[in-house]
Amino acid sequence: MTAPAREPVLRGLPPVATRFGFAFSGRGGWGACLRATGDEVALERWELARPVPLRSTLTGGGAARAADGHGLDRRCGVLPLDDGRVLVLRPATGADGEPAGHGTVLAAEPAGRGLRFTRAWPVPAMLAGFLLAAPGPAGTVVLVAVEDERHSRIWWLHWRLPALEAVVRIPGVLGGGVWVDGGRTLALDRTTAAHRTEGVLVDLRDRAWRRVWSVSDVTTDRIAAFSPRTGALAVTTTSPGAQQPGTGQIGLRSPRGGPVRFPEALNGSARPRTPLTFDAAGENLLVRETWGAAERLAVYAPDRDRLTPVPGPPGMLWPPALWADDGRIHLRYAAPHRPPTLAVVPGEPGADWWLAPDPDADTGWADADTVELPGPAGPIEAIVYGGPGWRRARHLVIALHGGPLASWRLDFEPLFQHLAAAGAAVAAPNQRGSTGYGEAHLRPVIGDWGGADLDDIVHLAREIGRDRAAAGLPGPVVLGGSYGAFLALLAACRAPRLWSGCVALAPFTSAAGLHGGASGAVRERVARLSRCDAPDAPGDGRDVLRACAAVTAPLLIVHGVRDEVVPVAQSRALRARLLELGRTEGVDFDYLEADDDHNGVVQAWSPVLREAVVRFCLAAGRTSLPDQGRR
């Protein structure tokens, strides 16, 4: 065993600035988004018609304070208008941080080189919602407010009136939002109380709605894009019984009418595709494709039934997308070394994408590579930080994604950046159950949590561990959040000598335990994807509370007291079980409860939590374990 080297000092990285909530004006001249840096949230407006988009900013304090004294937060939504003004939708929260059931629409107008709030309209009933502006000269602006789990209401916003005007109340939760004319008719996705999603048309003038896109009672059917210029319509529908998001079909309705057709060129691939928008002429459809851990754009030409890739840097892409009259495309982009930002795809082929400057461009964020690792049932793609020598880095973390039906992407991951800055390599595998690799890779985990996916993780750790043991290096630390935390704990139970440590962020201890204590929506998902109705047999190792006596690696367990997905009682039960087994808190395991929600803990957004995780990973790998390469 080699002597441990001196621990690297945690390098202080600046707060990560991330952009989200993108929206574009009706005629496409303006874009807007929110930028969050720590607790500070700012509004950015982009003038898109320039060769290089020009940014104006409204910060979260000072001038950004509305008449009621409250500013911007991460739950706000934005909408730029064609005249340069920006609307902000701000849901209200109570003292406990939960939605208060109402909100406010704020208007921001240009002020010097920035923006300032000038108007406010109260929203009497709203848990969530979004704003929409119709294209064309009508200037129609509507608010779609979700009042509760059973009803939504559409409101008109009139600049000369102090209050919103109610248009129509519709049963169900409304989402999406595509205008099918200059401001009278709106297409929306309606999700019923039975969690059935269908497309509806709302006539704002007649204050009436009707269902227009519904394939069956067991499919999820959405209206994705519409071209007012040609009448071309793009819709999506899931295949009956499909479990993977994005495995549905894309349908097109011709401008001449007739039935929706599903072109082979759009639907003949196992790679998930998402329709984004039509071009300005309404002749071509922009599509996002998922290629394993990366995404790319492609253009579908209906007249030739051809899908053509759009060259661009590897990374992640998000709707909405704007395809402007000049041929340029605007949307949100991120990569492992690039926090989310505005991207402009040039209209001319072969030209480089323009990316909005990063406020911390000089930070030198760590880049990552994708590698193919041999798994027990076939190759497994992994995203790795640490360069070609990542396997023999002094500290190695194997990170497991949540889900179970999810995956690691070539996205910006702040926790991975801090681990890399501290000298740790990270390997983030997309084991079986991960989306984006086809049905055969996905299906083994449905109804079998901690089965094929756990086999893959233990296999990878054993192969990597042998190489590390030969070099006198400690075994890797296994780290996961939510379902990934459950999987990490199972891995630490099944093969305890493979690991030098285990980090579980917002874990649950078994499918049956989560089903019994979670909220309605989570319960339904667990019931649909697992075997929670048949509790695990005592000997099959799927219950962490039963199996944790085998764990020998140090544990770090973190949970948010405001977790709305996995109840904190799951981690409290694990802590109690470890104490019952005679384990010593602060020696054998560390237990932390954070004043945060599920996502805040899983993504380790808090700087204090992030540093605690990094320090644990460094400390856990200080020394080698005696037989980490053996079964």
Image (tube, rainbow, N blue to C red):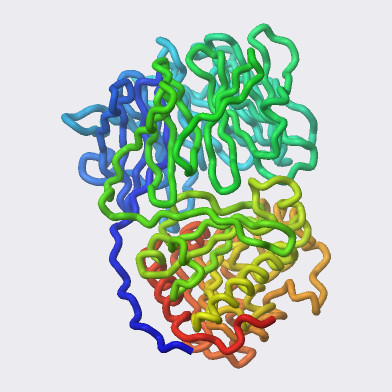
**Quadrant including the C terminus:** bottom right
Q: Is residue 169 left or right of residue 423?
A: right
Q: Is residue 223 above or below residue 417?
A: above
Q: Quadrant of residue 555?
A: bottom right
Residue nearest the observer in this picture, 613 or 170: 613
Q: In the image, residue 6 lies at what x, y percent?
A: 33, 82
Residue 62 can be seen in this image:
yes
Q: How many marks?
A: 0
Percent x, y for residue 66? Answer: 28, 39
In this rendered view, identify the residue nearer to me: 373 or 188.
373
Could you tell me which residue is drawn at 39 percent across and 51 percent down? 337
Spot the residue most to the left. Answer: 112
Q: Residue 493 at x, y = what percent?
A: 66, 79
Give the side of residue 208 with respect to residue 295, left or right. right
Q: Quadrant of residue 511?
A: bottom right
Q: Position of residue 142 (x, y in %)?
A: 47, 24
Q: Quadrant of residue 108?
A: top left
Q: Nearer the viewer, residue 115 or 96?
A: 115
* Furthest-top residue in this view: 256
Q: Is residue 153 above or below residue 447?
A: above
Tell me the residue at 49%/39% (across/down): 317
Task: Give the answer, above or below, for where 188 lies relative to 57.
Answer: above
**Residue 452 located left or right of residue 372:** right
Q: Residue at x 32, y 47 (%)?
A: 41
Q: Nearer the viewer, residue 340 or 425?
A: 425
Answer yes or no: is residue 449 visible. Answer: no
At 76% from the left and 36% from the top, the residue drawn is 239
